Amino acid sequence: MFSKKKNTPHPHIDCLINADTVINGDVIFTGGLRVDGTVNGNIITHEGKSGTLIISQQAKVEGRVAVTHAVINGEIQGDIITQEFLELEAHARVSGNITYHTLEMHHGAIVSGKLTHAIRVEQSEPKEIIFPFQGVLQEETQKNAPEIPLEIPTETLSENPQEEPRKKIRVKASGSL
């Protein structure tokens, strides 16, 4: 009943980027990172590692953020991808698309972009995954055809996604994503 989560937020700060600090370049980290200054580059966690990012009210990030957990109270100009949890506090200002698993958004937070709920995939055997799909997919069926990866030629997609109704495609997946 009270199971321990695999990817819990990092409980303490391992690194601090001070308010007077400007970093030009990507920041790759594990553990806990607090940004009070400016980062002109991407902020990401090491592949396969957990990381918690805290962006304070006076902080500014111009780049993509891809982390496990994030608490945002400053300005981000770029896309945000969180694998587990994203909290947008009252002074958060995001100009970019957000992909999240769990989202908490406080009154006053501003997002100029698209919010997308990501389905976390933890599997040991092949299962069916549903991806949102916009456009037209021309189907060709053959009996007893071998399984091959799904490929969608660009000419089959609509130029304007608003013209076509939203569709879902089902894809067989195996292994880890």
Image (cartoon, helix red, strand yellow):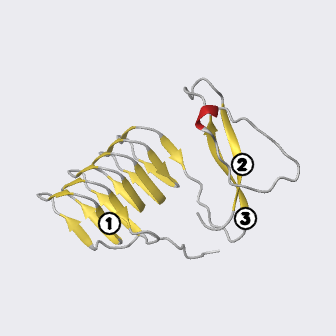
Q: What residue type is labelled 3?
A: Pro
Q: Is residue 161 above or below residue 31?
A: above
Q: Nearer the viewer, residue 54 or 143?
A: 143
Q: How far apart are marks 1 and 3 (CA)?
A: 31 Å
Q: Residues within 10 Å of mark 2 (few under 14, many from 20)?
A: few
Q: Where is residue 114 in the image (x, y as percent from the top left)?
A: 46, 39
Q: Mark 3 points at which residue?
A: 126
Q: What amino acid is found at the position of numbered circle 1 in the picture?
A: Ile
Mark identifier at residue 28: 1
| Residue at disc 3, secondary structure | loop
Read off the residue under disc 2: 170
Q: Where is residue 172 in the image (x, y as percent from the top left)?
A: 72, 56
**Dot 3 crowding, Cα within 10 Å, few <14, some 14–19, many 20+:** few
Residue ID at (55%, 52%): 118
Residue at position x 25%, y 55% in the image: 56
Residue shown at 36% from the left, 72% from the top: 30
Query: 147 and 96: which one is in front?
Result: 147
Identify which amino acid the numbered label 2 is placed on.
Arg
The answer to whether residue 31 is above or below residue 85 is: below
Q: Determine contact: label 2, label 1, CB under 8 Å.
A: no
C-alpha gap between disc 2 and disc 1: 34 Å
Q: How crowded is mark 1: few (under 14 residues within 10 Å), some or many (20 or more)?
A: some
Residue 106 image offset from top left, x and y in percent: 40, 46
Q: How many labels does the image show?
A: 3
Whole-percent x, y for residue 82 in the image: 45, 57
Along the line of sight, the residue nearer the viewer: 147 or 31:
147
Residue displayed at 70% across by 52% down: 171
Which numbered disc, 2 or 1, marks the residue that appears first in the sequence?
1
